[in-house]
Image (cartoon, rainbow, N blue to C red):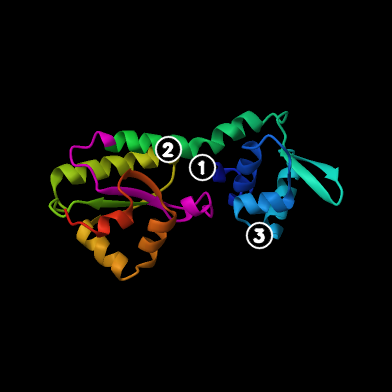
Amino acid sequence: MLAGAILASNEVRVLRALVRVDAPLTGRAVARITGLTQSTAQRALTRLREGGLVLAESAPPSLLYRANPDHLAMPAMISLLGLDDQLRARVADRVAAWGLPPLSLVVHGSVTSGEATSASDLDVLLVRPDATEPDDATWQGQVADLADRLRRWTGRRTSLIDMSQQELVQGLADREPFLVAADRDGWLIAGRPLGDLLGRKS
């Protein structure tokens, strides 16, 4: 996500795959690991090779690709590729201290799907207990503080949706696209998975 401010999202996915393995990979293997089409993975590999971040060696009938550990930017790129994990840990630590904890906090949207650009918002879904009113001062203070911190931590605008468990249950029953996608692909940061909240009201 955050490395996407420097590299295109597909290049981030490809480079992350390469730095996580010890052995070189074929273009087909990179596509399989990243979930990209072979042509999309190949374009990303070509751009990364042009920048020197990826090396290729001939292994007929294929090329084998590996991250270039000697590139001056590689230590910085590895740090950037780990920023998503750092963000998740920071948010989890912050929310763990809330006086009114959420039933669920999920980051979703283009950031988690690998399609984010430098202009993309950070999409966050907060599910509060039905007993907590949306205008509760404590709850609102927590939410505002988190939105401010996310902006300072990532430099991205935060699009934060705050809903009750009842609203979540109804939205999932109606197959609201963003809720279905958040349940399927989102990063669960705190609380319970969205689907687990369907069975019991709070």
- What percent of the width, then of the height, locates residue 88? 41, 39
Which of discs 3 and 2 lies nearer the camera? The answer is 3
Which of discs 3 and 1 lies nearer the camera? The answer is 3
Is-magenta flag for residue 72?
no
Assign a secondary structure to mark 2.
Answer: helix
Crowding at mark 2 (Cα within 10 Å: few <14, some 14-19, many 20+): some
Assign a secondary structure to mark 3.
Answer: loop
Residue 37 in which image quadrant: bottom right
Residue at image point 60% right, 31% down: 76
Cα distance in 3D space between marks 3 and 2 = 28 Å
- What percent of the width, then of the height, locates residue 62? 82, 50
Residue at mark 3: 37
Is 13 situated above or below 184? above
Mark 1 in CB contact with mark 2 (< 8 angstroms):
yes
Residue at mark 1: 2
Q: Is residue 90 left or right of residue 59?
A: left
Residue at mark 2: 87
Q: Is residue 199 left or right of residue 77?
A: left
